[in-house]
Amino acid sequence: MADLALIREIEHAALGAWPALEQWDDEGWLLRFAEGYTKRANSVTPLQPCSDTIAAKVARCEESYLVRGLPPIFRLVATLMPEELDTYLGCRGYALIDPTLVLSTPLSQLSLPCPLHPLHPIDDIDSWLCAYQAVSGTALPQATHSRILSAVEGRLMLATLDRDGGPVACGLAVVEGAYAGLFDLAVAPAWRRQGLGRTLMGGLLRRAQEAGATRAYLQVVKANGPARALYEGLGFSELYRYWYRVGSVEKADR
């Protein structure tokens, strides 16, 4: 079994690296809200057993999201959640989506590639977000994304790889103590399968090492085979798993 202390530390680091705009701690169940932007920042993460009944606790959590017009979402960490919670939510009609792997490795054991192109660090969050939207091709609520990144308490490292006068890959790292998390990794479709993802990650992780990090982690949807192959090829391996249970805003028993 994976080291529970390490899992808790990685969870703490990851939640801090992608902060909600509002967060409550209800006896070890973290309720997070960020105007609906990303499930990670708008869900309940139970990290402890509850002293109340599961039914009462879930009902209280549901109401906190429903009054905001948000669907109740539970982010369930396999090794930390109350064992009966997933079954209970399934029986209530919550959909199970996005099984996700948390991969980790000591930075000393990573096989970092020699950089093919120089990393372009960016200090301004909004400038980086413009690059991220151009590279990823998604129309995201940039104002909320900017507020989330501005709330990061660890050391935030934003970077792009540029070719032909513009960004073709981008990503970010957050260093908190010994841990470095990688997030928002993207390569423009026309530039994929050219080693830019490995180069981007290598550059970010080198900067993280220079900032004092000794272990890296990242999160990848289980079904994303190409991304998993990239990360595992660098030396990452599975530490633990989580998934989401998503309810409806229009719950009949509200």
Image (cartoon, rainbow, N blue to C red):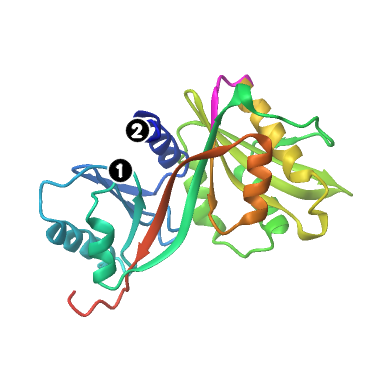
Q: Quadrant of residue 19?
A: top left
Q: Secondary structure at mark 2?
A: helix
Residue 140 % position (x, y): 58, 62
Question: In percent of the image, x 17 and y 63: which residue is there?
Answer: 59
Q: Which residue is mark 1?
A: 80
Span colored in magenta: 210-216
What amino acid is labelled 1 in the image?
Answer: Leu
- Would residue 158 appear left or right of 10 to someone viewing this image? right
Q: With 46 as the anchor, is 172 left or right in this view? A: right
The reply to whether dot 2 and dot 1 touch (C-beta < 8 Å) is yes
Q: Which mark is residue 187?
A: none
Residue kind at label 2, given as amino acid type: Leu
CA gap, disc 2 to disc 1?
8 Å
User: Can you see residue 69?
Assistant: yes
Instruction: Give the SS element for disc 1.
Output: loop
The residue indicated by pointer 2 is 4
